[in-house]
Image (spheres, rainbow, N blue to C red):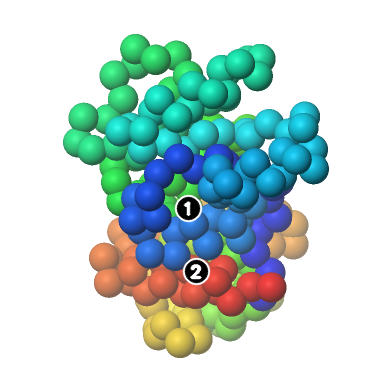
Amino acid sequence: MNVEASVKRSILYHASQDALGPKTREILGRLGYDIVDPADWDARLERDPELRPDLLLVDDRRLVEAEIHDDEGDPVPIVLLSGRQGATGADSRIVGAVKRPAGLHDLYRLMQQVFEDTPRSTPRIATHLRARCERGARSWDGRVLSLSENGCLIRTPESIPLGQRIRLDLMLPASGPVSLDAEAAYQLLPDVGLVFNGVSPAHRETLGRFVAQTLLAAN
């Protein structure tokens, strides 16, 4: 399975390892956000002195460490890994804050907002999953081509008009079955984009686990 394509972004990391949630750093790397420690960054600078990070990810108790980058021209934007206080807005370099330890979805959502013109709220993976669709008394099979916690892109022999609601049953390898209420939100011919409605916490956890496991297993 392939992960969604993403431009590689260099994120210079001034924080302890426990300031991020389990596997957060690794999964973000698979999604195109390369989180680099200062020592590794210095080694890269030796090879390319013109190199600049796209973003600084900084523990708010170590903000002084970010000042070294102010001498390199335009300030590099900063996302704080913060306690409960968050960001005050007094420092113009700071574009956002996430509570420590920062989890995958919070950081992914924020980085999408910082970098992408059309941000996504959750990671999306390419799949080829069999799906069972139901609408009233009718049922038919389809293939889910991409999947996130919020929706999917599906290809089916049966037309799904925009705005139409269906029941979607999926069996996720190593994660289990999920049954979802979905609505056709857009077309990417010949496929249809579905948005999930009213996902239960248990099913959202199952979807999130499957997406994370797939990202970790990707080459």
The residue lying at 27 percent from left, 66 percent from top is 200
Residue 138 visible to the viewer? no
Q: Residues within 10 Å of mark 1 (few under 14, many from 20)?
A: some
- Closer to the chain start, of discs 2 and 1, is 1
Verify CB contact (< 8 Å) between mark 2 and mark 1: yes
Give how far apart the Cα atoms at labels 2 and 1 are: 10 Å
Image quarter (top left, top right, bottom left or bottom right) of the C terminus: bottom right
- Give the amino acid at mark 1: Thr
Q: Is residue 134 above or below residue 33?
A: below
x, y (%) of residue 217? 59, 76
Which residue matches tag 1?
122
Tag 2 secondary structure: helix
Which residue matches tag 2?
211
x, y (%) of residue 87? 31, 25
The residue lying at 65 percent from left, 41 percent from top is 42
Q: Nearer the viewer, residue 81 or 49?
A: 49
The residue lying at 40 percent from left, 25 percent from top is 64
Q: Nearer the viewer, residue 190 or 213?
A: 213
x, y (%) of residue 208? 41, 67
Image quarter (top left, top right, bottom left or bottom right) of the N terminus: bottom right
x, y (%) of residue 158? 64, 72
Report which quarter residue 115 is drawn in: top right
The residue lying at 45 percent from left, 59 percent from top is 24
Tag 1 secondary structure: loop
- Give the amino acid at mark 2: Val
